[in-house]
């Protein structure tokens, strides 16, 4: 597996990022890895590299390129601090649903042009980017075979731009691994999402990881739960092989 530094042209500028080549011959279906709110850093790189070691090319764009290159958060900022909250507002404000859709199309197009990569793709989103995974599946339904969200937030809200309203546009298999007692995705939101999924009629799974709190899959998150993170990884790789092939 080789990690390459890349630049992805988008409608709004250039996203830096990383491309992981698994070192196998022939065109391989790939995985678009959408980072959590912390952006590209060691924990996310390790997760992407591990997925690539399973034999899949992985694209990890800097979702927050409009606000700068990694590290997205300066050293010393901590969740809950006012400066941290201010930085969160800065990096998320430009990411309107329309901007996310434009970026998603650019990421898919760029990925498809890389040597050793072929469609279809999977998209995985963590925390904040769970919505990105859904929007990617909706904006390019013919290219995304699997979209997975782990401890994703705000997936089903009363807002007219809520991701769950995009289900009629999605052809991919969907997976949602919810956190336990997650303020960004409370039980009423999970219920709303599950009802929409039933009406949608596509292939999906939606489950809550008991005792695993928001951010449990990410090793540098205070909520990291190693046992449940391994369960999530096994589930995702199983879905990858089911949806994309081994």
Image (cartoon, rainbow, N blue to C red):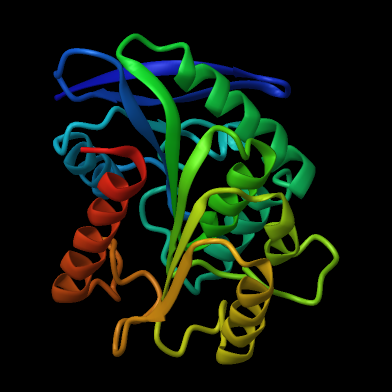
Is residue 136 found left or right of 236 in the rendered image? right
Viewer-proximal residue, 214 or 88? Answer: 214
Q: Residue at x 23, y 13 (%)?
A: 26
Residue ID at (30%, 47%):
240
Q: Indicate the position of residue 89 as horizontal and vertical percent values.
A: 67, 57
Q: Is residue 219 visible?
A: no
Up-down relation of residue 75 to residue 28 (above or below): below
Which residue occupies the extreme right position in the image?
160
- Locate the N terminus and report the quarter of the image it occupies: top left
* Residue 33 as seen in the image, left or right of residue 26: right
Seen in the image, is 154 located left or right of residue 17?
right
**Where does residue 4 sit, x and y in percent of width and height?**
28, 18
Q: Is residue 40 left or right of residue 226?
A: right
Up the image or down, 217 lies above or below 15; here it is below
On the rendered image, what quadrant is the C terminus found in? top left
* Residue drawn at 21 percent across, 34 percent down: 52
Residue 101 image offset from top left, x and y in percent: 70, 39
Q: Quadrant of residue 71?
A: top left
Does residue 238 show up? Answer: yes
| Residue furthest out toward the front | 201
Note whether 62 is above or below 5 in the view shown: below
Q: Tell me residue 224's x, y (percent).
A: 24, 71
The residue that appears at 71% across and 32% down in the rendered structure is 102
Q: Quadrant of residue 66?
A: top right
């Amino acid at each position: 597996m080789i990690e390459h530094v890349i630049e992805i042209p988008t409608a709004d500028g250039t996203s830096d990022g990383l491309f992981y080549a698994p070192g196998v011959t022939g065109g391989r279906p790939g995985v678009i890895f959408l980072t959590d709110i912390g952006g590209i850093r060691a924990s996310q790189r390790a997760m992407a590299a591990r997925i690539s070691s399973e034999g899949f090319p992985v694209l990890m764009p800097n979702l927050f390129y409009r606000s700068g290159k990694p590290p997205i958060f300066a050293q010393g900022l901590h969740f809950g601090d006012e400066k941290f909250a201010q930085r969160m507002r800065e990096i998320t404000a430009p990411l309107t649903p329309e901007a996310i859709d434009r970026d998603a199309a650019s990421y898919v197009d760029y990925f498809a042009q890389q040597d050793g990569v072929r469609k279809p793709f999977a998209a995985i989103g963590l925390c904040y980017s769970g919505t990105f995974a859904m929007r990617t599946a909706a904006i390019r339904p013919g290219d995304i075979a699997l979209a997975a969200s782990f401890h994703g937030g705000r997936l089903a809200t009363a807002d007219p731009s809520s991701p769950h309203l995009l289900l009629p546009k999605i052809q991919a298999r969907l997976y949602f691994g919810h956190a336990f007692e997650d303020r960004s995705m409370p039980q009423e939101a999970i219920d709303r999402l599950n009802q929409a999924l039933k009406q949608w009629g596509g292939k999906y799974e939606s489950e809550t990881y008991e005792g695993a709190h928001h951010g449990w899959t990410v090793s540098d998150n205070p909520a990291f739960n190693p046992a449940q993170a391994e369960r999530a990884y096994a589930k995702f790789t199983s879905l990858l092989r089911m949806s994309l092939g081994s």
